[in-house]
């Protein structure tokens, strides 16, 4: 009987020792999963900006700016000057978006993967509490940075595209005047 009790006690001890303490991590897991959803939403919002439209706006801005700089010799009206200035000022923003879009999305995807892996590790109990708190803090900071970066860049490119749409008709008329009624050919993209 003592032997049977001893064996049962040993089995119970082994069973309890093999159970990982994941209960304490439930709050963190929920927080990480929620943060992952917010990052995914930020990516979705960022992707609503049509990158082909941005590319075409950039090509048009560059082509018209170069053409006007080479051919405009006369004085222009105040409205024309404002439109030319507006079109000229958005070139860097368009280029920055086109140059960094893939990088921003890759960083956001990496953050989602990190959040997923950390959440999974917490659920499995394969991370010690001290390490977990440090990792969670690091991932939260990175996620917040990514969310803010995507938000700022989405708002910025939308404003830039609005300026482009507003100034393009006036600039196109100036270009037509300088180019015998026609616009220079543009290498426009039609799909991503």
Image: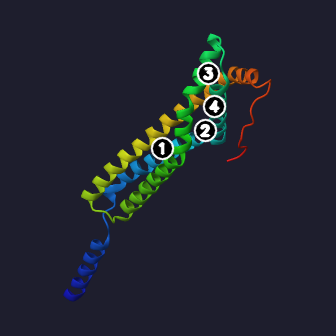
Q: Which residue is mark 1?
A: 38
Q: In the rendered view, does 57 fall on the left or right side of 19?
A: right
Residues at badges 2 and 3 in contact (C-beta under 8 Å)? no
Q: Which residue is mark 2?
A: 49
> Gap in Å between the C-alphas at discs 1 and 2?
18 Å
Residues at badges 4 and 1 in contact (C-beta under 8 Å)? no
> Gap in Å between the C-alphas at discs 4 and 3?
11 Å
Q: Residue at x 45, y 39 (%)?
A: 149
Sequence-first tag of 4 and 3: 4
Farthest residue to the right: give it: 181
Q: Which mark is residue 66?
A: 4
Farthest residue to the top: give it: 78
Q: Which residue is mark 3?
A: 84
Q: Residue at x 19, y 86 (%)?
A: 2
Spot occupied by residue 29 in the image (x, y as percentages of width and height): 39, 53
Spot occupied by residue 44 in the image (x, y as percentages of width and height): 57, 43
Q: Mark 4 against mark 3, which lies toward the viewer?
A: 4
> Gap in Å between the C-alphas at discs 1 and 3?
39 Å
Q: Quadrant of residue 55?
A: top right
Q: In the rendered view, does 184 fall on the left or right side of 58?
A: right
């Amino acid at each position: 009987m003592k032997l049977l009790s001893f064996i049962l006690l040993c089995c119970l001890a082994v069973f309890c020792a093999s159970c990982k303490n994941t209960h304490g991590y439930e709050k963190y897991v929920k927080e990480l999963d929620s943060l992952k959803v917010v990052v995914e939403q930020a990516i979705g919002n960022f992707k609503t900006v049509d990158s082909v439209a941005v590319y075409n706006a950039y090509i048009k801005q560059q082509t018209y700016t170069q053409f006007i700089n080479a051919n405009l010799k006369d004085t222009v009206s105040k409205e024309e000057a404002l439109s030319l200035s507006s079109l000229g000022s958005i070139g860097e923003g368009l280029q920055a978006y086109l140059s960094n879009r893939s990088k921003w999305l890759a960083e956001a995807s990496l953050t989602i993967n990190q959040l997923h892996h950390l959440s999974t590790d917490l659920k499995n109990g394969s991370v010690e509490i001290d390490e977990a708190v440090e990792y969670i803090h690091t991932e939260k900071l990175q996620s917040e940075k990514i969310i803010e970066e995507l938000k700022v860049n989405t708002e910025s490119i939308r404003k830039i595209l609005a300026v482009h749409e507003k100034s393009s008709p006036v600039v196109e008329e100036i270009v037509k005047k300088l180019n015998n009624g026609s616009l220079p050919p543009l290498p426009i993209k039609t799909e991503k």
